[in-house]
Image (cartoon, rainbow, N blue to C red):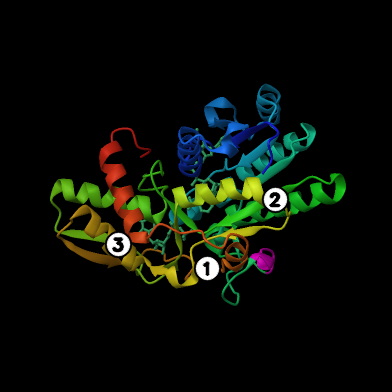
């Protein structure tokens, strides 16, 4: 473990994953953990600089002089938000990623860990998906803008490595959820959208709750605090430019209907769940292998899905006044 002092800039530090990393680092600091003693962590949101803008991005790097970067900032959203804004997802994320990686190169940042997603993999593929398959075929049409922009991070990482020897790498999380998520009905991912809508249903005394689509698609979900611990581990221990999948096991994949039932239990909602099959299902599944992670970090324990859902529902109930809606 390095004892040289590090300044770690987290772009997207105000979001779901950024806030989880902040929680984990604060925990480490309160326990006087050796690693974090030499680290200064800076968490930035869009109010600290619009990373779509090159000059603002350079100014942010000039201000903080990071030695390391965790790059999370992105236009992010659930299936329905992606379907409605594919062009914006592509253009905004391409601009953010180009600006952040170029500023990292110019400021001689020693390591950048950027964030891809398992939803950027080819739609027509064999399973399980692994790290070698990022560019193998077209992504699902519902989120082609987000997917191609994310894939270009891997292209930039390889280019900066080949041309300048930079250690710019990426992680590939499965679906993430937890405290500080975006609980917007229109823009949110399935877990926060269902938590928020079911909370509304409980409050208005509804007898029925509608899940969008058939409920059959399969997803792997990682709790944001688990992902945060893995992100910090990658920053400190993983030095390859090749992406690494950060996901729960393949056996932990669940249908959307199970997610809805667990959220129902956590909310204590007593009504009936119905499915609106006129709404999109999106990609049927994107089952990813975490074999590489398991081979490098053997004893990592994921929070059980039900516990994480329970804790996220409890967080939402306590924080709904200032949650992102
Ligand atoms: P999030 O909660 O929506 O947070 C997005 C972050 O990006 C916020 O801090 C936001 O700042 C910042 N941001 C957005 N546009 C910006 C801009 N133009 N300039 C500067 N900052 C900007 O998203 P998240 O779920 O934490 O996602 C973090 C990373 O994980 C993203 O790269 C995402 O693609 C990836 N990922 C997410 C999931 C998932 O299920 N959520 C799954 C796989 C991968 P403000 O809030 O201050 O505006
Ligand atoms: P994805 O995993 O990238 O496809 O994105 P999401 O997190 O938005 O999950 C989409 C899946 O959840 C699809 O199968 C949707 O049909 C289903 N789903 C059910 N209800 C909702 C909802 O209220 N919001 C969202 N975003 N998805 C929903």
Q: In which quarter of the image is the N terminus?
A: top right
Is there a contact, CB below 8 Å, between mark 3 and mark 1?
no
Is there a contact, CB below 8 Å, between mark 1 and mark 2?
no
- Say if residue 11 shows up in the picture: no
In the image, which disc is placed on residue 286?
A: 1
Question: Quick one: 58 or 227, which is closer to the camera?
Answer: 227
Q: How far is mark 1 from mark 2, CA to CA?
A: 22 Å
Secondary structure at badge 3 equals helix
Q: Name the residue under label 3.
A: 260
Q: Give the range drawn in magenta.
A: 131-136
- Discs 1/2, front: 2
Q: Where is residue 213 in the image (x, y as percent from the top left)?
A: 36, 66
* Label located before the other in sequence (3 or 2): 2
Task: Decide if residue 244 is on the left or right side of residue 85.
Answer: right
Q: Which residue is drawn at 57% across and 48% down?
A: 231
Q: Quadrant of ligand 2?
A: bottom left
- Discs 3/2, front: 2
Question: Quick one: 179 or 28, which is closer to the camera?
Answer: 28
The answer to whether residue 290 is above or below residue 311 is below
Mark 3, ligand 2, within 8 Å: the answer is: yes
Is there a contact, CB below 8 Å, between mark 3 and mark 2?
no
Q: Where is residue 144 in the image (x, y as percent from the top left)?
A: 59, 58
Q: How far is mark 3 from mark 2, CA to CA?
A: 35 Å
Q: Name the residue under label 2.
A: 169
């Amino acid at each position: 473990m390095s004892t040289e002092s590090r300044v770690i800039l987290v772009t997207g530090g105000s979001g779901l994953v950024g806030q989880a990393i902040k929680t984990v680092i604060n925990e480490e600091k309160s326990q006087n953990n050796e690693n974090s003693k030499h680290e200064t962590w800076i968490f930035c949101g869009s109010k600290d600089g619009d990373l779509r803008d090159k000059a603002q991005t350079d100014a942010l790097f000039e201000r903080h002089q990071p030695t390391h970067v965790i790059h999370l900032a992105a236009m992010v959203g659930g299936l329905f938000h992606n379907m409605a804004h594919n062009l914006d997802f592509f253009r905004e994320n391409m601009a953010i990623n180009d600006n952040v990686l170029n500023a990292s190169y110019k400021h001689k940042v020693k390591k950048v860990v950027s964030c891809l997603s398992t939803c950027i993999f080819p739609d027509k593929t064999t399973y399980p998906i692994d790290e070698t398959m990022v560019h193998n075929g077209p992504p699902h049409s519902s989120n082609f803008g987000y997917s191609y922009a994310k894939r270009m991070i891997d292209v930039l990482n390889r280019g900066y490595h080949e041309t300048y020897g930079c250690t710019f790498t990426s992680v590939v999380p499965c679906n993430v959820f937890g405290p500080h998520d975006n609980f917007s009905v229109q823009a949110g991912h399935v877990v926060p959208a269902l938590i928020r809508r079911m909370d509304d249903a409980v409050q208005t005394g509804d007898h029925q709750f509608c899940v969008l689509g058939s409920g059959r698609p399969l997803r792997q979900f990682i709790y944001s605090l688990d992902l945060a611990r893995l992100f910090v581990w990658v920053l400190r221990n993983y030095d390859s430019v090749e992406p690494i999948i950060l996901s729960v096991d393949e056996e932990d994949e669940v249908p959307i209907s199970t997610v809805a039932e667990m959220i129902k239990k956590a909310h204590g909602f007593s009504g009936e769940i119905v499915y609106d099959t006129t709404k999109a299902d999106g990609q049927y599944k994107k089952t990813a292998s975490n074999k590489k992670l398991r081979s490098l970090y053997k004893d990592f324990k994921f929070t059980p899905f039900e516990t994480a859902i329970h804790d996220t529902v409890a967080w939402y109930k306590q924080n709904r006044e200032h949650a992102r809606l």
